[in-house]
Image (cartoon, coloured by chain):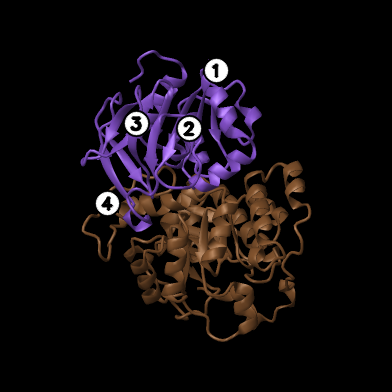
Chain colours: A brown, B purple
Amino acid sequence: MATTTNGTATSYIDRVREPRWLNSEDAEVGSYAVKSGLAQMLKGGVIMDVVTADQAKIAEDAGAVAVMALERVPADIRSDGGVARMSDPNMIEDILKATTIPVMAKSRIGHFVEAQVLQALGVDFCDESEVLTPADHEFHSNKWEFKMPFVCGCTNLGEALRRIGEGASMIRTKGEAGTGDVVEAVTHARAVLGEIRRLQELPEMELMTAAKNMGAPYDLVLYVHQNGRLPVVNFAAGGIATPADAALMMQIGVDGVFVGSGIFKSGNPAQRADAIVQATTHFDNPDIIANVSRDLGEAMVGISSSELPESEQLAKRGW
Amino acid sequence: MPLNIGVLALQGDFQEHRAVLEKLGANVTEVRLPHQLEGLDGLVIPGGESTSIAKLAVRYDFPDALRRFIDEGGAVWGTCAGMIVMASKLLEPEPEPFALMDITVSRNSFGRQVDSFETDIPVDGVPGGPVHAVFIRAPSVQGQGEGVECIAKLEDGTPVAVRSGKLMATAFHPELTPDTRIHELFLRLSAGESSPV
């Protein structure tokens, strides 16, 4: 096996991890380099939640880099209540057939059998997601065992590095999904990026204690200290609803954005999707952001995340 | 004089290309609008999602601007999605390629992400042994016009890198490995070396 990814596959991964694929006869299929590499191909792009093949087509036509196939967008999961699980394989297969861009789907936290099912379906990326009801109160899935790459949510750097240590190929902020309120995504992105900057400044002798305090693997703490970035791609998610929200997250310093309920819960999904894609590319060009923000119709109604009782805060899920 | 190289920064792994090119001493510009092509010796179209890159490019009239850039002597290299948008013809209905290079390309030619792979392949004009090539939902070349030369194949004979004059396309991602030899080859093309390969 060879993991020679430039600046992404870590010395940690080269040194201590041997890939253990479930069904692969060829160790070079589904290597860490091709898993984290797919995430790199998504950079500067928008990943959109879709619940039907028609929505997937609208997302692809708008320039989405990938779609997240799920039965209910987070706003509906919130209002419906009950246990939220992996989507119906038929529904996921319809979307796999309808689009040529990568298809992501969600498994519950720790529900590695749902992840096995998604890999068997040919899903391109698994989101081990706090938006679904967790299946394990202590442990996340061992993502090294899959040739399908994983994205996981985080609220701070320690959590991001724990997920990478478990084999995640991509990280996203949790934000507060299904609210249309960007404040939590901002908080989590600033937490991760701020902690990266602080780690960079620390003298090397303080890194082990930093690793202990944040509950993160030492080798990954060392990587961040040396490189000033995560070893994988870092997206924003959870509450992004407008072109300006997307550009805000990009200017804060993430690599791309997920838009969940924000598009297909709005008045004019096709136009809003297109506008958010453009604002993500031209995130540093306010003239273009102004242009694409005109006459978009109603944004999703939204819930202020500070009004959510703690029991309804999805970002608290994950360990 | 360092070469002025642009990296099309609409979407994809343009920062990875930028990092390699800067390490090799090029003066790198991220190109998001066509006027930023002015004064460049070469342009890299990075890996990414070809439908996304094509859509954003068409929106701001890049296809015509790129053809003018090539007519005026600019070098262009596409990796993966970049190869797809450079093609004259795709076997799939979308996206509409920019017809910069006389090649027929098939998208996702090796299957879905779970089929993505790495392998070592020799590349013509790149001394020092095979190149470690990373293929991610990669395309392949299904046909090439006169004057287009295949410079790398997989073991089964599938063409995965082509060159024609100052144009080059690779189905794999040299920007994802620490090996800089393909980027060096592109800089020689951009500098107008008569027989860089």
- Give the residue type at disc 1: Glu
Of marks 1 and 3, which one's residue comes earlier in the chain? 1
Q: Nearer the viewer, residue A67 or B4?
A: A67
| Label 3 neighbour load within 10 Å: few <14, some 14-19, many 20+ | some
Residue B156: x and y, percent?
Answer: 21, 42
Mark 2 or 1, closer to the camera: 2
Mark 2 or 4, closer to the camera: 2
* Chain for disc number 3: B
> What residue does disc 4 label?
A28
Answer with the quarter of the image where residue B166 lies.
top left
Q: Are marks 2 and 1 in contact (CB under 8 Å)?
A: no
Q: Are marks 3 and 4 in contact (CB under 8 Å)?
A: no
| Label 4 neighbour load within 10 Å: few <14, some 14-19, many 20+ | many
In the depicted structure, whether residue B73 falls above or below residue B105: above
Answer with the quarter of the image where residue B77 lies.
top left
In the depicted structure, whether residue B18 falls above or below residue A28: above
Same chain, labels 2 and 3:
yes
> What residue does disc 1 label?
B72
Spatial CA span between label 2 and label 3:
12 Å
- Give the residue type at disc 4: Glu
- Give the residue type at disc 2: Ala
